[in-house]
Image (cartoon, rainbow, N blue to C red):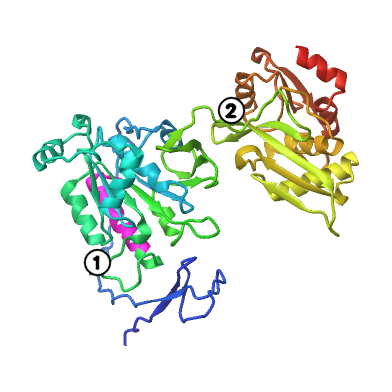
Amino acid sequence: MAKQPRTSYVCNECGSTSPQWYGKCPICNTYGSLIEQPPPSASRGVGVKAPNARSSDEQPHPLAALTFPEIIDGEEERWASGFGELDRVLGGGIVPGSLVLIGGDPGIGKSTLLLQTANLMSKHYRVLYVCGEESGKQVKLRASRLGVEGTKGELTSEEIEANGAAETPKQLTVADGANLYVQAETDLEEILRELESLRPHVAVIDSIQTVYFPALTSAAGSVAQVRECTAALMKVAKREDITLLIVGHVTKEGAIAGPKVLEHLVDTVLYFEGDRFASHRLLRSTKNRFGATHEVGVFEMVDRGLREVDNPSELFVGDRQGMAPGTAIVVACEGTRPIVVELQALVSPTSYPSPRRAGTGIDYNRLTQILAVLEKRVGIPLSKLDAYVASAGGLNVSEPAVDLGMAIAIVASFRDRVVAPFTILIGEIGLGGQVRQVSQLELRLKEAAKLGFKRAIVPKGHQTFPDLGMEIIPVGRVIDAIVAALPAETEVEDIDED
C-alpha cells in the first residue's frame, strides 16, 4: 500500500521543515513561526525505461551535453543602469537576463534607487515597474518628487504604442517616460501575463514578499510563497531574456526575509545599508556571478532622491589640519575599492565595576583583542578604562588591515596626543604584538597619496614604492608604530612646516 503524504510545518524565519507543530522552531528557536504546509500531490511515475545492456563495442555518445569548444560564446553584453556606482557593484553593468536581489532596512531607499534606475534605463530600454506595496498614483507622486520624466504630462495611447514597438534595446531612445510602465499588482499570474505580453528588457519587482501565488494556501511573504514566486519569475525571465531587479525585505537581524534558497536562485545579491538619519548610503555586493563580491557603491540621499558619490574617501575623512587627540587615518578595502576612513577613539576612567567597550562601524571582537594586546605587550592599563571606537560616517570597516589604526587611536586618546598630521596607518596586529602584512598595499597607498597624505606606517616586509611621493615607515611591532605615529611636539611642528 502506498504511503500517504503527511502535512509538514515550515518555519517562516529559517525555512526548516518539521513533521509536527511546535510552539518554538527547533532550529532557530523562534516562537510562533511554524506554518502548516499542505502535503504535495502524489507524484506519478514518469515511465522512464531502464537502459538496455549495451555491448562493450558500442561507443558512448552524449544526448544533449556539449563540450566547451562546441558551446557558442559571444562577447559579454552589459547594460548601463545610469548610476556608475551601481554598475561598479554589479561588475560593470547589468547583465541581460540576470536576476538581481536588493535587500535593506525599511526606509533606507531601495524603492527610490530602483525607481531612479528604471527612469534612467527607460531612455534606452523598455522597463516595467511592478509595485506591490503602493498604488499607481502613489508611485507617480513619488516619481514626480524625484523628477522622473513623464510624470507631469499625459501621453496618448498612440504615442505609447509607437514608442513601445521597438524590438532591440538600442532603438529605444524615446524620452518623456514613454518606455517606463507601472503595474500595481500582487497576483503572480497577472504579473507573469504582463511580462509575457509586454516583454520588457528590465522589470522591477517591489517587493517579492508582497507577491502571492493563488494556488498556494499560505499567506503572502511565507516561505512557500516566496520560493514559488521567485522560481516562476526566474523561469519567465530566463525564457524571455528579461532582467529582473527584485526588492527583498530583511529581518530584524539584517538578513533577507524568506528561505535561504531565495539567495541561491538569483544571480546577484545586493544589500542597501546605512543610517536612515544620515545622508550617505552604501550598496554592498555579497554574491555576484558576473563580478567580484564585496564591492561597495556610495550614494547620498538628497531632496531629489539618491546621488552617487564619486570620491567616498573625502566623505569619511574629517579635517586633517585640526585633528583631535584619539583620531587616526586608515585605508580600508571594500572589494577592489580603497576608502580612506578616519577612526576615532575615546578612553576614559570607568564608573562601573567592569569597563565598557563599544564600537561603531568596527568589529567588536577585534576591538577587545586589540585592547588586550595593548595591555599585555605595551603595558597600558586598559582593563580599568572605558574604550569607545567609531569610524567616521558609520562606515563598516571590519577587515584586519585597520587594526593598526585602531590601536594607535586608542593609545593617542589614552596619552591625549595627536597623531602626526597627514599620516596613514595600515597593518594587522597579531596576539604577540607584531604587525602583520596586509593585501593590496600598493592600491591603498595610491589612494592615500591621491588625497595628499605624506607619511605611511606599514608592516615590515613589503616592497618599497618610491614613485608614490610618500615617506614609507615599515614597522614590525606595535610599540614601533606608536613611536613613529606619536612624535614629540617639535617633530609635529616640523611636519606641519613641510
User: In which image quadrant can residue 201 be found?
Assistant: top left
> Label 2 belongs to which residue?
314
Q: Position of residue 407 (x, y in %)?
A: 78, 38
Which residue lies at the image location 19% right of the left edge and 53% below the top edge? 194
The answer to which of marks 1 and 2 sits earlier in the sequence is 1
User: In which image quadrant can residue 477 be found?
Assistant: top right
Dominant secondary structure, magenta: helix
Q: Residue furthest left?
A: 158
Tag shown at residue 48: 1
Which residue lies at the image location 35% right of the left edge and 70% below the top edge? 219
Q: Can residue 428 be seen in this snapshot?
A: no
Magenta region: which residues?
A: 226-243
Above or below, 351 against 444 in this view is: below
Residue type, numbered disc 1: Val
Q: Secondary structure at mark 1?
A: loop
Horizontally, residue 236 falls left or right of residue 447, namely: left
User: In which image quadrant can residue 73 be found?
Assistant: top left
User: For the residues marked 1 and 2, what is the alpha-carbon distance in whole angstroms?
Assistant: 65 Å
Residue type, numbered disc 2: Glu
Question: How many C-alpha atoms fall within 10 Å of the one at disc 1: few (<14), some, or many (≥20)?
Answer: few
Above or below, 457 against 144 in this view is: above
Above or below, 396 against 51 in this view is: above
Q: Position of residue 170 (x, y in %)?
A: 22, 30
Q: Position of residue 145 (x, y in %)?
A: 34, 41
